[in-house]
């Protein structure tokens, strides 16, 4: 299950990166306003993510009782992959850019609250009894 969880996490991560990097980061606006400015808003991404997650669960044939654990683990891996993405972007820069800082902040949020991130950001519902 670990190998597929990492692959699922990569898809979830890249959807978050796609959303975040489509958002203009303006100095004269608070960070809370950025989400409404995204060229690829989460409202457009969520249906695809829900469909992807449902298809993954069907194909993996995991028992319903482990869906929450699998989602938690996938989101944690996605959070770690966000850190790696920020690091990869740094190789061409001499200082941190706003995009990198926001990727790192997003990764921190996902790592600290993976199930909440799944619901709030990606629109993936958490089954009752999800752990952690």
Image: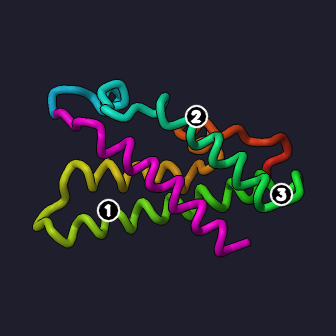
- Give the colour scheme shown: rainbow
Residue 88 position in % (x across, y down):
29, 69
Q: Which residue is mark 2?
A: 47
Q: Main secondary structure of the magenta part?
A: helix
Q: Nearer the viewer, residue 19 or 95?
A: 19
Magenta residues span: 1-26
Q: Secondary structure at mark 2?
A: helix
Which residue sits furthest left? 94
Which quadrant of the rendered structure holds the N terminus?
Answer: bottom right
The residue at the point 38 percent across, 50 percent down is 17
Q: Quadrant of residue 34?
A: top left
Crowding around mark 2 (Cα neighbors within 10 Å: few <14, some 14 to 19, many 20+) is some
Q: Which residue is mark 1?
A: 86
Residue 52 position in % (x across, y down):
63, 48
Q: Secondary structure at mark 3?
A: helix
User: Count the marks: how many?
Assistant: 3
Which quadrant of the rendered structure holds the C terminus?
Answer: bottom right
Q: Earlier in the sequence, mark 1 or mark 3?
A: 3
Q: Up-down: is 49 above or below 112?
A: above
Crowding around mark 3 (Cα neighbors within 10 Å: few <14, some 14 to 19, many 20+) is some
Q: Nearer the viewer, residue 127 or 54?
A: 54
The residue at the point 64 percent across, 40 percent down is 50
Q: Up-down: is 127 above or below 41?
A: below
Residue 115 position in % (x across, y down):
65, 46
Q: Quadrant of residue 33?
A: top left
Q: Which residue is mark 3?
A: 66
Separation of disc 2 and disc 1 at Cα?
26 Å
Q: Earlier in the sequence, mark 2 or mark 3?
A: 2
């Amino acid at each position: 299950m670990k190998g597929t969880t990492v692959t699922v996490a990569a898809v979830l991560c890249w959807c978050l990166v796609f959303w975040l990097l489509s958002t203009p980061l303006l100095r004269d606006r608070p960070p809370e306003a950025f989400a409404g400015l995204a060229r690829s808003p989460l409202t457009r991404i969520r249906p695809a993510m829900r469909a992807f997650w449902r298809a993954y669960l069907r194909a993996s044939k995991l028992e319903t009782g482990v869906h929450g654990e699998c989602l938690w683990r996938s989101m944690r891996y996605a959070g770690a992959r966000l850190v790696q993405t920020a690091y990869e972007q740094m190789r061409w820069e001499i200082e941190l850019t706003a995009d990198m800082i926001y990727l790192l902040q997003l990764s921190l949020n996902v790592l600290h609250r993976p199930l909440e991130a799944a619901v709030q950001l990606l629109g993936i519902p958490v089954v009752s009894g999800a752990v952690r």
